[in-house]
Image (spheres, rainbow, N blue to C red):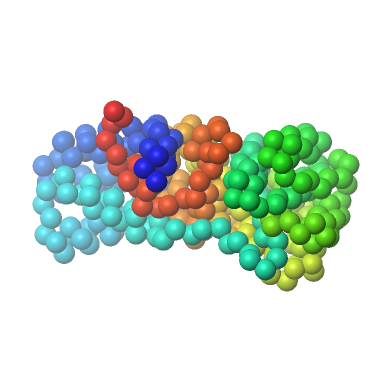
Amino acid sequence: MAAFFSKLRETMAKTRRSFVTKMTELVTAHRKIDEAFYEELEDILLQADVGIAAADRLLDAIRADVKLRKISDTAQVRGLLQEKMEELLGEQAPLNICASSPTVILIVGVNGVGKTTTIGKLAYRMSKEGKEVLLVAADTFRAAAIEQLEIWSERTGAHMIKHLAGSDPAAVVFDAMQAAKKRGVDAVIIDTAGRLHTKTNLMAELGKIQRVIAREDAEAPHEVLLVIDAATGQNALRQAELFKEATNVTGIALTKLDGTAKGGIVLAIAEELGLPVKLVGTGEGVDDLRDFVGHEFVQALFAEADH
């Protein structure tokens, strides 16, 4: 666990350096907690991409506690903010793993967010846990997507179901569900296309895929994970809203957290979408995909400068 916290802290270095520096400057510059102090605190939160809704919720909670506890020292607000962030993120939401039949995980998201890499890392993790994994190339729109998934199949030892580029994605999924039963695999991870510029087609395609899955297993898919690139900030929220319209998203897999100073998007997701972040990519390595734990994220955010 200590190793994971260290890795998470490293992953969040850009966000943390920016955030900690600004919080330190804020506390140093203000001797009292007044409106000017709250305005600057709001700016810091928004610059970290916490989003207006989450920032408002945090500030309202802090104002209430400052008044209730009669807090006057600006330095104490730092600890208060940490506490309120942990409350906003809530309890850990682990992946829903089915014990009686293959766990079916539908992966959605726009192209370029790290979708295929996330699938590969998840397959690797499950394989290391002794699970038989079946990868499904249902993004038939791009031949490159099928080829990338093949590479991960070979790398992780996972089985794979594919059709030719341009095939019906739902037909690929049907074959995969049949194969999963015959082979007795433990997990089915399905890649899908992410063409937001053809929103109607995307929604129809995802709806058809879900109907095919449900006909084979009424409880499936057990997870619909939306992959989001942390660096896209508030644009990620708009993407998420479109995918929520198309399918029943159950959680978020957050990638590229190490490449942005705007890691506060995690809080915006929790507040505005009501979706838990379930997985977080912590680097480029095949094993750099971990369960997201809110209080560890906040602790890493508030950690002091690198040693």
* Residue at 70% from the left image edge and 52% from the top image edge: 132
Relative height, residue 21 to residue 115 (above, below): above
Q: Residue at x 17, y 49 (%)?
A: 76
In the picture, residue 178 is in which quadrant? bottom right
Query: Does 143 sit above or below residue 76?
Result: above
Q: Is residue 285 left or right of residue 142?
A: left
Farthest residue in the front direction? 130
Q: Is residue 24 left or right of residue 250?
A: left
Where is residue 148 shown, x and y percent of the image?
73, 35
Locate residue 277 relative to residue 138 in the image: left or right: left
Q: Nearer the viewer, residue 276 or 284?
A: 284
Q: Residue at x 83, y 60 (%)?
A: 182
Q: Quick check: can you spot residue 114?
A: yes
- Left or right, 19 with respect to 99, comes to left
Image position, residue 199 (x, y; %): 72, 50
Q: Position of residue 20 (x, y in %)?
A: 28, 36
Residue 26 place in picture, x, y as percent: 21, 38
Q: Residue visible at 68% across and 40% down?
A: 156
